[in-house]
Image (spheres, rainbow, N blue to C red):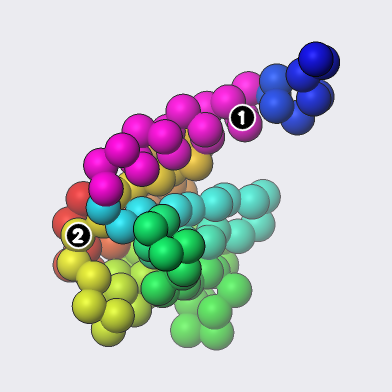
Amino acid sequence: MAVKRYESNGAVRRARKVRSRVKATGRLRLSIFRSARHVYAQVIDDASGTTLAAASSLDESIKNGGNKAGAEEVGKLIAARAAEAGVSEVAFDRGGFAYHGRVQALAEGARAGGLKF
């Protein structure tokens, strides 16, 4: 059976590897995605397949957009929304992205907002 082109993509393989390790912890998952212009974050319950909280640099309360300062604001916002949903501990799913730049800024903002991971 032939492997589909997207399955052999390095980014997809890295994301799967990270996600499988995160799911093995059994905790709720803080999943992030970064595009060229924006940063997105979700707190996901894999057991029920539901999203408990979400935030992105597209929210009107975020002023800096998709740069590092905006990513840190998104981290603080997702931490506040997760606290409203009763979530205090998560596992960080960086989705195959390197822990650097906007990904690191979002994680630090979430920690500053009170999330533990």
Left or right for 59, reference 51: right
Residue 11 marker: 1
Which is in the foreground here, disc 1 or disc 2?
A: 2
Please name the amino acid that badge 2 sits on.
Glu
User: Is 88 within the magenta?
Assistant: no
Q: Is mark 1 on a helix, strand or loop?
A: helix
Asked where in the image residue 101 lies, by quadrant, the reply is top left
Image spot of residue 53 (x, y percent): 41, 74
Residue marked by disc 2: 89
Instruction: Identify the disc placed on residue 19.
Output: none
Marks 1 and 2 sit apart, C-alpha to C-alpha, by: 26 Å
Q: Specify the farthest residue to the top.
A: 1
Q: In which quarter of the image is residue 13?
A: top right
Q: State the count of labels.
A: 2
Q: Residue at x 47, y 84 (%)?
A: 61
Q: What residue is rendered at 49% in x and 41% in y?
A: 95
Q: Main secondary structure of the magenta part?
A: helix
Q: Position of residue 33 (x, y in %)?
A: 54, 52
Label 2 secondary element: loop
Residue 108 seen in the current view: no
